[in-house]
Every structure is written in structure tokens, then in C-alpha cells.
Image (cartoon, rainbow, N blue to C red):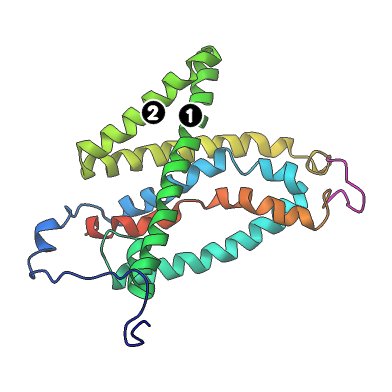
């Protein structure tokens, strides 16, 4: 029989370290308020170019609108939470650190796996989008798109290897340029807005022009509404690099 005084299953042990352990491993503090703003907006802004638009097919204009409101409320709560936790635990683990502190090693481990999945898959989606844009601009054949992907990966990885200062400065400039492009697009597209075009999806049985796929379309549009805010949760990862 097993000893009731001992819990079953895998155990995790902690190693005590000296006080200077973390001091020797601290990251260089460079980022100010403007750099953090650019990092957050720059992380999110790709979703304003593409990704969200598939929600129109999934839920129609009304479905995507309601889904976006729901996701907005969720991200407001998330932003307040990570802002408070990043100030209380200013180390670069981000959500992994928060989960490990609150739920123990296994909670941190699972959260870390989820974070890794997000930060592996999201850049892949973004470089595919970049490849599509560059291919259209330079009129290269579709077979060349993997080369654009490699160029984008090499550029972004190279900037991070180069150092935190150049990475933050690059994020500021690229964010300002992206905002300018969106502003030009919005101003240019605004005179052409037409409600008839927004509601031109043929409704399914039981649906309407506003909700062409019914109330279920709201649920279908939720993953695409996330693109408006996706990756803002990466900001706490820069906690140790903030002044």
C-alpha cells in the first residue's frame, strides 16, 4: 500500500540561489514609455491589415461587430490585469511568470507552452502576409513567396540579435509607418463606405442581412475579432527592459 503521507505523481523541486543570481542575468534597461507604446501597438497593428476580415464571411457585419465588442471587453480586462501584474512582478517571463506564481510550476509550464504556440504560429502568419504584399508590389511569381518569408524572418531575427536598442527603435518607426498607411487607407475608403456593401452577404435560413449566419455567426467570428488585439499580451515580456 502507498504511504498516505506522500502525494503521488511527479514532483517539482526548487533550487535555492544566491541573491546575485538574478542580478547577473538582468536584461539591459532601455525602453521608455514611447518604446513600450510602439511595441504594443506594433504587435497588434498587423491584425488591422488582415486576419479580421475573414470574420465578415464567418458572421457577417453584425456577427463580427458583436464579436469585436465581446473581444474588446475581454482584452480591456486582460490589459488591466497584465499591467498590474507586470508592475508587481517585473521580470521577463510574462504570462508564464504570472501563471507559475499563481498556480505553481505546472500552471506555468502549460501557460508557457500556450505562449510558445502563439509566438511561433503568429509570426508565421505575419510573414506569409508580408510575402503576399511584397509579391504583389514587386509582381513576383507565387513560387517566390517562400523567399519573402525567409527575408522577413532574417530581418526580424537579425534585429533581435543585434540588440534591444535597435529593436525598440525599429518598432517605433515601423509602427508609425503602419499607422500612417492605415490612416491614408481609412481616409481614402471613408467616402466609399456603403451600408449596402456592408450587408451584402446573402442570409442563411433563419438569418438576416445583419446576422447572415444567425447568432452562431458571432461565435464563428470571435477568432477573427481577436486579430484586432492579438499579441498585446506580449508587453510584459519587456518588463526587465523597461526603465
**Considering only vertical position in the picture, is 35 above or below 151?**
below
| Marking on residue 130 | 1
- Please indicate whether residue 100 sits to the left or right of residue 144 in the image: left
- Residue 207 is a magenta residue: yes
Q: Measured from the top left, where is residue 109 in percent x and y?
A: 37, 61
At 71% from the left and 51% from the top, the residue drawn is: 220
Magenta stretch secondary structure, dominant: loop
First in sequence: mark 1 or mark 2?
A: 1
Q: Kindly indicate the quadrant of the structure image that contains residue 50.
A: top right
Image coordinates of residue 232 in percent, x first then y, are 44, 54
Quadrant into which the N terminus falls: bottom left
Residues at discs 1 and 2 in contact (Cβ within 8 Å)? yes
Q: Name the residue under label 2.
A: 152
Q: Residue 105 in the image: x percent, y percent? A: 33, 68
- Is residue 4 or residue 117 the one in the foreground? 4
Secondary structure state at the residue bearing disc 1: helix
* Residue 232 in the image: above or below residue 127: below
Q: Total label count? A: 2
Q: Nearer the viewer, residue 233 or 242?
A: 233
Question: Residue 38 at x, y = what percent?
Answer: 37, 48
Which range of residues does the magenta coloring cover? Answer: 201-210
Label ID, residue 118? none
**Residue under the point 30% across and 35% down:** 157
Amino acid at each position: 500500500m502507498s504511504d498516505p503521507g506522500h502525494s503521488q505523481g511527479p514532483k517539482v523541486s526548487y533550487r535555492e540561489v544566491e541573491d546575485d543570481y538574478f542580478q547577473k542575468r538582468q536584461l539591459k534597461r532601455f525602453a521608455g514609455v514611447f518604446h513600450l507604446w510602439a511595441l504594443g501597438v506594433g504587435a497588434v497593428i498587423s491584425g488591422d491589415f488582415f486576419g479580421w476580415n475573414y470574420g465578415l464571411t464567418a458572421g457577417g457585419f453584425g456577427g463580427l461587430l458583436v464579436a469585436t465588442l465581446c473581444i474588446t471587453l475581454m482584452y480591456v480586462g486582460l490589459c488591466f490585469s497584465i499591467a498590474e501584474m507586470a508592475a508587481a512582478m517585473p521580470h521577463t517571463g510574462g504570462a508564464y511568470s504570472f501563471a507559475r506564481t499563481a498556480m505553481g510550476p505546472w500552471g506555468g509550464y502549460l501557460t508557457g507552452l500556450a505562449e510558445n504556440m502563439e509566438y511561433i504560429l503568429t509570426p508565421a502568419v505575419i510573414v506569409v502576409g508580408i510575402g503576399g504584399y511584397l509579391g504583389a508590389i514587386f509582381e513576383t511569381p507565387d513560387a517566390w513567396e517562400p523567399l519573402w518569408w525567409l527575408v522577413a524572418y532574417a530581418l526580424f531575427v537579425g534585429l533581435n540579435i543585434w540588440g534591444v536598442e535597435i529593436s525598440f527603435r525599429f518598432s517605433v518607426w515601423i509602427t508609425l509607418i503602419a499607422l500612417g498607411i492605415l490612416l491614408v487607407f481609412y481616409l481614402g475608403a471613408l467616402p466609399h463606405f456603403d451600408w449596402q456593401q456592408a450587408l451584402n452577404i446573402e442570409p442563411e435560413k433563419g438569418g438576416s442581412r445583419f446576422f447572415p449566419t444567425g447568432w452562431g455567426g458571432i461565435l464563428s467570428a470571435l477568432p477573427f475579432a481577436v486579430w484586432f488585439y492579438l499579441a498585446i499580451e506580449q508587453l510584459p515580456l519587456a518588463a526587465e527592459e523597461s526603465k
